[in-house]
Amino acid sequence: MEKHQVQWAAQFAVGAELMRRGYSCAFFLGNQPSYDLLCTGKQDFHLQIKGFSWDKPKKPSSKGNYVIIKDLFTGEEQDLIVIVRVPKHPEAFEFYIAKRKDMADAENVKPDAINPKSGKPYAKFSAGISYRNFEKFKDCWNVLPPPHL
């Protein structure tokens, strides 16, 4: 599956799941760089959605791949992020939901971090979070404001 297909599948999967849970949703179609979905429940909120389709790490000691979140450490702390695993059919989607601050706090390598072995900064890289650091947010729908129901 192509990268853009994964992202669209992730966004529509989140929208569908939120509708099932009693929210109303509207998609931003490329003109709102930090957010992908506007939602209404008992209060309005917006989501940044990231999709991935790679396999989860098999070894418990492996951190796994990273999901790039450009403004993970610089965005608003209360912003909500949903990471979606878009598996091959017939597997089900997996949702990882957290506030930006909680996701940023879970990632232990910041873009400006110093490598403890060498004492030098790590090479420049985009902000992101590894699978092992975001897996604890699986199905944490309770961080969202209450739905209309």
Image (cartoon, grey):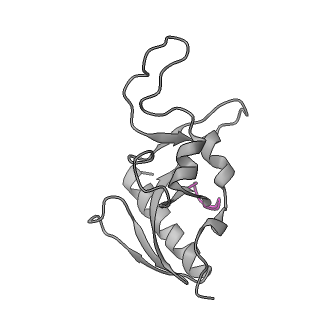
Residue 58, horizontal then vertical, whole percent: 70, 36
Q: Which residue lies most toward the top here?
A: 118
Which quarter of the rendering shows the C terminus? bottom right
Please name the predominant secondary structure of the magenta segment in the image.
Answer: loop
Near-viewer residue (28 or 34): 34
Residue 39, horizontal then vertical, whole percent: 47, 77
Near-viewer residue (54 or 125): 125
Name the residue: 53% across, 42% down. 129
Along the horizontal axis of the image, is 136 left or right of 34? right
Q: Which residue lies most toward the left here?
A: 31
Q: Is residue 86 above or below residue 142?
A: above
Name the residue: 68% across, 50% down. 136
Q: Is residue 113 above or below residue 68?
A: above
Residue 120, horizontal then vertical, whole percent: 44, 15
Q: Is residue 92 above or below residue 58?
A: below
Q: Which residue lies most toward the front here?
A: 77
Residue 1, horizontal then vertical, whole percent: 45, 51
Magenta span: 86-93
Q: Which residue lies most toward the bottom here?
A: 149
Near-viewer residue (29 or 79): 79
| Residue 92 sits inside the magenta stretch | yes
Residue 55 appearing in the image: no
Name the residue: 62% across, 42% down. 133
* Count of numbered circles in the view: 0
Near-viewer residue (40 or 74): 74
Residue 101 appearing in the image: yes
| Residue 127 sits inside the magenta stretch | no
